[in-house]
Amino acid sequence: MKTVIVAGLLGGVVLIVWTFVVNGLFGFQSRIDMNQIAAEREVYEVLKEHFVQPGRYLCNPAPAADGRGPTEGPVFSVLYSGVGHESAGSLMLSGLLVFLIAPLIGAWLLSQTSRRVRASYLRKVLFFVAIGLLLAVFTDIPKFGIGNYRLADALAFAANNLLMWTIVGLVVAWRIRPMENDRP
């Protein structure tokens, strides 16, 4: 069990470092999420006045003259979580906890697999690649669509998740080994 905890914590450290480097130093997510608006102050005041309840809001073009839905024009998506800058510190702390718990769960799940899986470094890494692939397919790719991200951005998020979990897998796989009392 100690090996699983150490492996999971090392994986958590890798997740934190990866996120810091990719987002903190290279600005990966902020380049996608924080585009500048020309009249930002005016747009901010309108949003603050009209979006008072947390939620995701879609702004569609006006319907056609015959009453049918719009066939052209951009759709804007506004997400208001109800959280402001004052909560940044506590959200970072909860994010750090998630970054430590997720690899711990992954390491524990890996420790519960067959000896055959744990006997192969490649299979252990592929176990984490599968986790990254599941996250990419079920959390990142669905971010594409009307009122969401462009396809290129959703695919970039997916690639980041897949690569991140592959690197976590490289570290965790290095620490998790077959147990002496395992059946073949």
Image: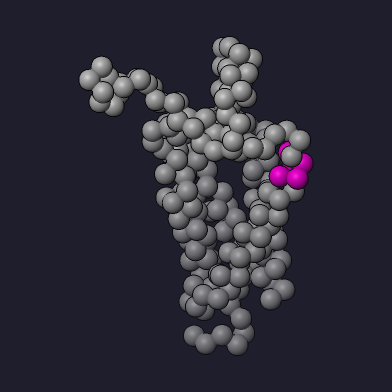
> Residue 12, located in which quarter of the rendered image?
bottom right
Look at the image and say whether residue 53 sits in the magenta stretch.
Answer: no
Position of residue 5 measured from the top left corner of the image (x, y, whole percent): 70, 68
Figure check: 153 above or below 50: below
In the image, which residues are magenta?
A: 88-92
Figure check: 180 above or below 9: below
Position of residue 140 measured from the top left corner of the image (x, y, whole percent): 47, 44
Horizontal relation, residue 131 to residue 62: left or right: right
Residue in view at x 51 percent, y 75 percent: 113
Q: Residue furthest left?
A: 66
Horizontal relation, residue 99 to residue 113: left or right: right
Figure check: 103 above or below 96: below
Position of residue 119 measured from the top left corner of the image (x, y, whole percent): 53, 74
Our reading of the magenta stretch's main secondary structure is: helix
Q: From the image, which quarter does the N terminus lie in?
A: bottom right
Q: Is residue 64 visible?
A: yes
Q: Is residue 71 visible?
A: no
Residue in view at x 57 percent, y 29 percent: 51
Residue in view at x 74 percent, y 39 percent: 87
